[in-house]
Image (tube, rainbow, N blue to C red):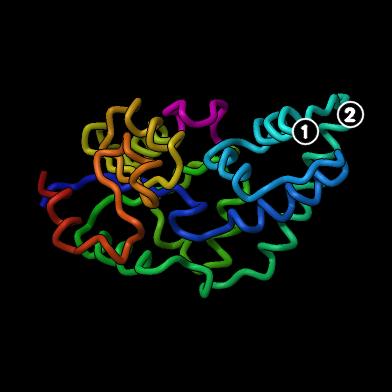
């Protein structure tokens, strides 16, 4: 059987930490006297912390000094880390473990490609870190999605050509990054949002072993 590379985003694909990000950003927004909504939080999917802060400042029409920005970036991350400190494997999204186990049984390459700088600690909390042959996160890249850097580095780490790489993403920026890399893109979420992906599933419970096998054999 041919060996392919399966590259997973973290937030919204393996685990839902978006809720923790939202709570931390919302509390930060209060300091700007701005009511940050869950709908606006969707703009932060697949985006780096620095870029997310810039988006928030723009939404709030708030002028911040560089010193304020640096303080807020640290403050937001520290609050987020408090939330994820309490995480365990009950937070893993449905059927993620089944898919990872199937890919391992078929001797496929599995890597993480995430903007999060906390990816390794989260995977450790979830008892999943051993499932990933390579991890490329926000500490390893300079360009944020939709730039394809994170997925290109993931494919390189597994020593597999980009045309043999399959990406699982929940954000439009992530899907665009996968497409820009020339990889197969699979959206996890809503079809009307992720319509640029090659395939879209609401979650992994909709994805059969037969479909995964077809990706390997393609």
The location of residue 142, given as percent across then percent down, is 57, 27
| Residue at screen point 44% across, 65% down | 93
Judged left or right of residue 176, residue 61 is right
Q: Which residues are magenta?
A: 140-150
The residue indicated by pointer 1 is: 60
Neighbour class for label 2 at 10 Å: few (<14), some, many (≥20)? few
Helix, strand or loop for disc 1: helix
- Quadrant holding the C terminus: top left
Q: CA distance from mark 1 to mark 2?
A: 18 Å
Judged left or right of residue 190, residue 63 is right
The location of residue 160, given as percent across then percent down, is 26, 37
In the picture, residue 84 is in which quadrant? bottom right
The location of residue 63, given as percent across then percent down, is 85, 24
| Residue at screen point 30% across, 63% down | 99
Q: In the rendered view, tell whether residue 106 sits above or below residue 164.
A: below
| Residue at screen point 28% across, 28% down | 182
Q: How many marks?
A: 2
The residue indicated by pointer 2 is: 67
Neighbour class for label 1 at 10 Å: few (<14), some, many (≥20)? some
Question: Is disc 1 in contact with disc 2, using a CB cutoff of under 8 Å?
Answer: no
Q: In front: mark 1 or mark 2?
A: 1
The location of residue 10, given as percent across then percent down, is 49, 51
């Amino acid at each position: 059987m041919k060996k392919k590379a399966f590259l997973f985003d973290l937030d919204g694909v393996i685990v839902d930490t978006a809720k923790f990000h939202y709570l931390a950003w919302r509390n930060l927004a209060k300091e700007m006297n701005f009511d940050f909504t869950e709908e606006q939080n969707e703009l932060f999917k697949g985006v780096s912390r620095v870029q997310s802060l810039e988006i928030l400042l723009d939404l709030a029409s708030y002028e911040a000094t560089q010193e304020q920005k640096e303080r807020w970036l640290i403050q937001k991350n520290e609050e987020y880390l408090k939330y994820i400190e309490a995480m365990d494997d009950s937070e893993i999204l449905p059927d993620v473990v089944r898919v990872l186990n199937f890919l391992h049984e078929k001797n496929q390459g599995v890597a993480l490609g995430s903007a999060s700088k906390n990816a390794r600690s989260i995977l450790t909390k979830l008892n999943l870190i051993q499932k990933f042959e390579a991890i490329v996160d926000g500490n390893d890249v300079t360009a944020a999605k939709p730039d394809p850097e994170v997925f290109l580095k993931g494919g390189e780490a597994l020593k597999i050509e980009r045309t043999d790489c399959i990406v699982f993403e929940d954000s439009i920026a992530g899907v665009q990054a996968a497409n820009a890399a020339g990889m197969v893109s699979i959206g996890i979420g809503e079809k009307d949002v992720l319509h640029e992906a090659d395939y879209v599933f609401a979650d992994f419970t909709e994805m059969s072993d037969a479909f995964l096998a077809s990706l390997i054999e393609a």
